[in-house]
């Protein structure tokens, strides 16, 4: 794997199909670590999301699982999440 | 079932699909999930739960350093070193640590060996559990509902579809990753590879062979 132009491919596939997936992945690791939780805490949410929406793309379930974990563990409330989304919509990246 | 699953394009904020070939009225609109991810990251950073550089380093690690080339080295070592092979089969976590690999999702690694009469294949039926330290992150097909259900129900037929027909006298063992255990398939060393050194042997070991959906 050489050079910044070489996309990260393993066996012909990208590790993350889009940058947001990598962010969501890193966030989950960070949150679990920071809260001192076993990985199982996130994994259970992921399992529930996948079961609830079996046809949803995998990382959509991942992000939803992370949002659920954040609310369940009282890191943020649903209104706070909603407000953050509205701000993000109003302020493009 | 095809191995490669292309992602469906997402809807942009105005509800348009990306696959209409258009999108000329605004440059690369963010999808809904992108907005939610960005919002969540901003919120978590505000609350001091995560910082940007942590996420950057995780992404970089899994894009560059952590991948199936690690597992390939483990397999090649097991092929040339009989005592290492025994240690790998007895305690894979410790054995891969000898080569410097470890970390998240590698705390309870188990290596399962293929033989002329036994072929192993790994799945996580409920989500996507996968031995990250030796294989990196799982491919899309591994996470698909089709793979997760069919490999348990009809492994021989599925493997044949994926390009690995196995004779009926080969037993197929399907390992469903439990809460903690992560499996690595130790494939058989290919015939005719006797003259190769470890480095060249590692090049023969594919990710799919270490999942069990292919052979080197």
Image (spheres, rainbow, N blue to C red):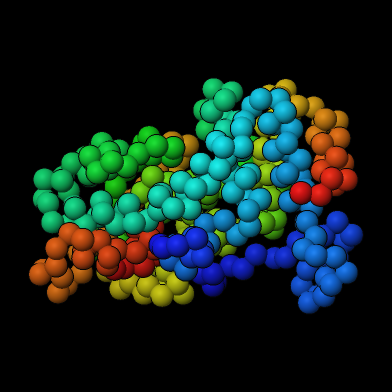
Q: Residue at x 73, y 51 (%)?
A: B34
Query: Number of callouts in the render?
Result: 0
Whether residue B178 can be seen here: yes
From the viewer's side, name the closer residue of A45 and B66.
B66
Which quadrant does the N terminus of chain A fall into?
A: bottom left
Q: Is residue B216 above or below residue B80?
A: below
- Residue beneath the point at 82% across and 30% down: A80
Instruction: From the viewer's perspective, tell me whether residue A10 is left or right of residue B74.
Output: right
In the image, B112 versus B199, the foreground residue is B199
Q: Is residue B159 above or below residue B131?
A: below
Find residue A65 and report its horizontal and vertical position in percent: 67, 40
Q: Residue at x 67, y 56 (%)?
A: A57
- Decide if residue B175 is in sight here: no
Apparent side of residue A66 relative to residue B133 in the rendered image (left or right)? right
In front of the other: A79 or B40: B40
Corner quadrant of residue B212? bottom left
Q: Position of residue B81 (x, y in %)?
A: 12, 51
x then y, percent, for residue B64:
44, 53
The quarter of the picture where residue B119 lies is: bottom left
Above or below: residue A5 compared with residue A27: below
Choose between B77 and B30: the one closer to the eye: B30
Q: Residue at x 25, y 61 (%)?
A: B202
In the image, residue B203 lies at what x, y percent? 27, 65
> Is residue B97 placed above or below A1 in the rendered structure?
above
Lateral position of residue B100 relative to residue A64, left or right: left
Classify residue B99 as left or right of residue B156.
left
């Amino acid at each position: 794997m050489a050079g910044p132009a070489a996309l990260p491919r393993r066996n012909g596939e990208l590790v993350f199909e889009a940058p947001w997936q990598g962010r969501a992945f890193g966030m989950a690791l960070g949150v679990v670590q920071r809260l001192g939780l076993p990985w199982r805490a996130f994994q259970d949410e992921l399992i529930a999301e996948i079961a609830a929406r079996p046809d949803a793309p995998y990382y959509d379930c991942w992000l939803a699982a992370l949002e659920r974990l954040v609310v369940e563990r009282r890191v943020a409330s649903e209104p706070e999440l909603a407000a953050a989304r509205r701000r993000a919509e109003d302020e493009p990246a | 079932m095809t191995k490669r699953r292309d992602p469906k394009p997402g809807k942009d904020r105005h509800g348009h699909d990306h696959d209409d070939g258009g999108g000329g009225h605004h440059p690369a609109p963010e999808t809904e999930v992108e907005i939610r991810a960005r919002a969540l990251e901003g919120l978590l950073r505000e609350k001091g739960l995560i910082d940007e550089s942590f996420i950057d380093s995780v992404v970089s690690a899994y894009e560059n350093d952590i991948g199936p080339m690690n597992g390939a080295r483990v397999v090649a070592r097991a092929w040339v070193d009989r005592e290492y092979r025994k240690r790998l089969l007895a305690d894979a976590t410790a054995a891969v640590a000898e080569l410097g690999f470890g970390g998240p999702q590698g705390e309870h690694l188990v290596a399962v060996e293929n033989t002329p009469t036994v072929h192993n294949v790994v799945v996580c039926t409920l989500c996507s559990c996968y031995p990250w330290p030796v294989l990196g992150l799982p491919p899309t097909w591994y996470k698909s509902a089709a793979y997760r259900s069919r490999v348990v129900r009809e492994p021989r037929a599925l493997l044949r579809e994926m390009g690995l027909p196995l004779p009926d006298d080969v037993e197929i063992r399907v390992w469903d990753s439990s809460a903690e255990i992560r499996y690595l398939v130790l494939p058989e060393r290919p015939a005719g590879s006797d003259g190769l050194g470890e480095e060249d042997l590692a090049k023969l070991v594919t990710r799919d062979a270490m999942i069990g959906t292919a052979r080197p």
